[in-house]
Image (cartoon, grey):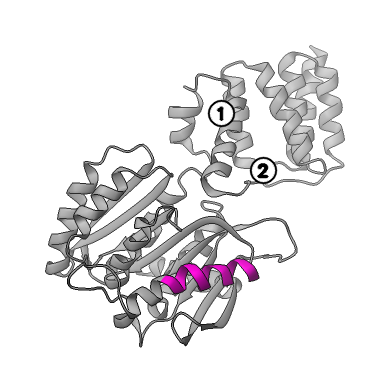
């Protein structure tokens, strides 16, 4: 088991070194100071391309940036979440001032108010001007910074769509304010919070109280998830909370798995093809960018079409695949599958033969195409 964890850690480190890391310094008028940033760009990031990427802002970037960036790069590698731009704000010498709030109002004042303005007026515009960031933004914090991220929810139009709050050191009145604000949100918002059995007791009690209040909220626009980890403390819960939070935030983006296939695709009121179109439309709506059709989802929808004997959907899927992957064996394979299913074996054979000249995909190669050809030829003899 120890060797397994070592391999996972090694892979995370390898992923992180292969992603593009950049160090920037921003000269802030609001703070009357300079701030150092750590920026991780996605693999194969192309500044000239039209594609944009979700923006993940990490407070306490001195120690929190690497676990967030590593997890994002690892999960994006397996297409479980989208590629993201990750920006860590270094605050080792300024965090007490940056997260300062008034004892009377429990709201940011002085340096805390300056940092609040810095984020919206300088940092985010700087990133959007220089990098391909989408409007979907995530903010991450731990203890003091996890409390601070909540203040961005209180804007009329919050800057962030997702909040990762790891063992927050909640300010007085924050629980009530959060419950009230999250109850009336009109924009789809993701909120993740975590504590642990060995978390700091003074923090844990408030967090448990906060969870009870947030769980009672009835607002379809709020997507709330809470974790109370066992055998973890104030620091180790960070390593467990980050991947769980990312899974929740980008749940819709994930490839269709067995659970989704059985519980949603097969039971969908419309056709399997309609389900696929809605899934990708929802992804674009939620995350602000268009997801490229992936082979895993094509296979799942094709299987559903065959199971439900839905020829119309299978034909639409085949034409979509041909449009999206004209040079891939995928286009020939699924068009051949459609003709085979409709009983036109001659056309199916021609499609499979044509596929031999195309490029193999993740799951489909020449051996599979030849096997389909032989099966069709045998069927034509009968």
Q: Is residue 128 magenta?
A: yes
- Give the crowd class for mark 2: few <14, some 14-19, many >=20 residues within 10 Å: few
Say whether residue 19 is visible. Answer: yes
Instruction: Determine which of the numbered discs, if any, sits on residue 363 in the image.
Output: 2
Q: Nearer the viewer, mark 1 or mark 2?
A: 1
Residue 312 position in % (x across, y down): 68, 17
In front: 261, or 132? Answer: 132
The stretch of residues the image draws in magenta is 117-130
| Neighbours of disc 1 within 10 Å: few (<14), some (14-19), many (20+) | some
* Of the pair 357 and 92, the residue shown nearer to us: 92
Residue 64 coordinates in the image, percent (x, y): 39, 73
Horizontal and vertical percent position of residue 99? 31, 75
Q: Which residue sits at x=21%, y=51%?
A: 211
Asked if residue 123 lies left or right of residue 188, the reply is right
Horizontally, is 375 left or right of 251 in the view? right
Task: Pick the quarter of the image with the C terminus.
Answer: top right
**Residue 11 among those drawn in magenta:** no
Question: The N terminus appears in which quarter of the rendering?
Answer: bottom left
Main secondary structure type of the part rendered in magenta: helix
- 97 vs 104: above or below: below
Q: Quadrant of residue 158?
A: bottom left
Would residue 11 be visible to someone looking at this image? no
Disc 2 element: loop
- List the residue tagged with mark 1: 275
Residue 218, picture quadrant:
top left
Q: Residue at x 12, y 68 (%)?
A: 202
The residue lying at 71 percent from left, 25 percent from top is 316
First along the sequence among labels 1 and 2: 1
Q: CA distance from mark 1 to mark 2?
A: 22 Å
Identify the disc placed on residue 34.
none
Q: Residue furthest top?
A: 382
Disc 1 element: helix
């Amino acid at each position: 088991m120890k060797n397994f964890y070592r391999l996972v850690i090694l892979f995370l480190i390898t992923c992180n070194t292969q992603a593009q890391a950049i160090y920037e310094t921003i000269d802030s008028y609001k703070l009357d100071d300079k701030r150092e940033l750590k920026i991780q760009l996605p693999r194969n990031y192309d500044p000239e391309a039209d594609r944009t990427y979700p923006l993940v802002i990490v407070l306490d970037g001195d120690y929190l940036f690497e676990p967030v960036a590593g997890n994002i790069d690892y999960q994006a590698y397996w297409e479980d979440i989208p590629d993201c731009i990750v920006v860590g704000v270094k605050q080792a010498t300024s965090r007490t001032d940056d997260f300062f709030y008034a004892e009377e109002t429990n709201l940011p004042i002085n340096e805390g108010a300056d940092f609040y303005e810095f984020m919206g007026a300088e940092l985010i515009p700087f990133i959007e001007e220089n990098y391909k960031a989408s409007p979907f933004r995530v903010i991450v914090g731990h203890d003091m910074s996890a409390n601070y991220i909540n203040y961005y929810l209180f804007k009329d139009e919050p800057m962030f769509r997702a909040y990762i709050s790891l063992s927050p050191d909640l300010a007085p009145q924050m629980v009530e304010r959060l419950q009230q604000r999250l109850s009336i949100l009109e924009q789809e918002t993701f909120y993740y919070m975590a504590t642990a059995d060995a978390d700091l007791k003074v923090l844990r009690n408030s967090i448990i109280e906060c969870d009870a209040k947030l769980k009672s909220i009835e607002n379809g626009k709020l997507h709330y998830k809470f974790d109370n980890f066992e055998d973890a403390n104030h620091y180790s819960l960070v390593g467990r909370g980050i991947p769980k939070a990312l899974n929740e935030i980008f749940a819709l983006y994930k490839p269709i798995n067995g659970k989704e296939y059985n519980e949603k695709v097969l039971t969908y009121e419309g056709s399997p093809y309609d389900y696929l179109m809605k899934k990708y439309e929802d992804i674009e709506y939620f995350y602000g960018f268009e997801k490229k059709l992936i082979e895993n989802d094509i296979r799942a929808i094709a299987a559903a079409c065959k199971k439900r004997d839905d020829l119309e959907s299978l034909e639409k899927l085949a034409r979509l695949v041909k449009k999206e992957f004209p040079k891939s064996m995928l286009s020939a394979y699924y068009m051949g599958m459609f003709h085979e299913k409709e009983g036109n074996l001659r056309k199916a054979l021609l499609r499979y033969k044509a596929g031999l000249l195309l490029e193999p995909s993740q799951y489909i190669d020449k051996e599979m195409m030849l096997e389909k050809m032989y099966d069709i030829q045998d069927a034509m003899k009968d």
